[in-house]
Image (cartoon, rainbow, N blue to C red):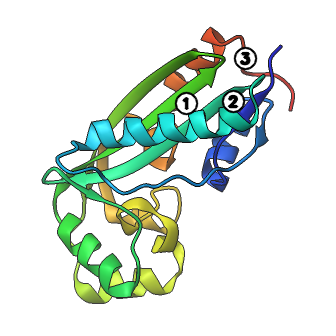
């Protein structure tokens, strides 16, 4: 069985892979995550997921490498991780009372072979005010989350409904990831 490496330091992605019983190790990579001029959100997340996997695979040529990227998209605009409280409040107010998309791409790479799959989940937000957004920021949770919220944590109370993959919103679409892993001879539901 080939070795699987997760090209990410995300604790959420680690937890999700453990949830489906996958054996892996982590080897985070740092790539430029600046959107390219005119790049659509889906192309952006796919480029980053594949770029992370390829960069890691270059360091570990015999392994299967999993790269992933998640972006929150509203009005065709990518909302990344907030740089400060004002940025987080701006993002949360932009999402307030509206539907947005969470796009998560997962890429697997091994020795010249690569597969990328993107999952888009529709997320509806409750009406928010600035005080609630600031209070949420003070919890520390939004600091490292795309769109300044985490559905798997305190941010769950901001979400009124979703259509699609909950695990993709957290950071890794498990059904699609499991299918890709199996196509690369990486079993799921193993004892870890």
- The residue carrying pointer 1 sits among few (fewer than 14), some (14 to 19) or many (20 or more) residues within 10 Å by Cα, namely some
53 w.r.t. 175: above or below: below
Mark on residue 20? 2
Q: Give the CA separation, mark 1 to mark 2.
A: 8 Å
What residue is at 42 percent from the left and 25 percent from the top? 117
Which of pointers 1 and 2 lies earlier in the amino acid sequence? 2
Task: Look at the numbered disc 1 and give the secondary structure of its residue.
Answer: helix
Pick the front one: 50 or 118: 50
Looking at the image, which residue is at 72% across and 17% down?
186
Mark identifier at residue 186: 3
Residue 25 percent across, percent down from the top left: 80, 40
The local crowd at label 3, few if under 14, some if 14 to 19, many if 20 or more residues have their Cα within 10 Å, is some
Q: Earlier in the sequence, mark 3 or mark 2?
A: 2
Query: Is 8 displayed left or right of 144 in the figure?
Result: right
Q: Which residue is mark 1?
A: 174
Q: Is residue 22 left or right of residue 43?
A: right
Look at discs 1 and 3 and give the one toward the viewer.
3
Task: Give the answer, above or below, for where 39 lies relative to 155.
Answer: above
Residue in the picture at 38% in, 41% down: 45
Q: Are marks 1 and 2 in contact (CB under 8 Å)?
A: yes
């Amino acid at each position: 069985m080939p070795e699987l490496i997760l090209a990410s330091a995300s604790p959420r992605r680690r937890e999700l892979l453990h949830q489906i019983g996958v054996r892996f190790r982590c080897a985070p990579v740092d790539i430029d995550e600046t959107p390219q001029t005119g790049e659509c959100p889906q192309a952006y997340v796919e480029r980053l997921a594949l770029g992370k996997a390829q960069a890691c695979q270059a360091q570990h040529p015999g392994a299967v490498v999993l790269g992933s990227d998640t972006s929150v998209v509203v009005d065709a605009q990518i909302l990344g991780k907030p740089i400060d409280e004002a940025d987080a409040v701006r993002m949360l107010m932009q999402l307030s009372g509206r539907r947005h998309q969470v796009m998560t791409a997962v890429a697997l790479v091994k020795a010249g072979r690569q597969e990328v799959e993107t999952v888009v989940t529709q997320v509806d937000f409750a009406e928010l005010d600035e005080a609630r957004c600031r209070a949420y920021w003070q919890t520390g949770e939004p600091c490292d989350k795309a769109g300044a919220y985490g559905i798997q944590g305190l941010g769950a109370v901001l979400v009124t409904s979703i259509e699609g993959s909950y695990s993709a919103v957290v950071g890794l679409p498990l059904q699609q990831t499991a299918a890709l892993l199996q196509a690369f001879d990486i079993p799921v539901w193993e004892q870890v």
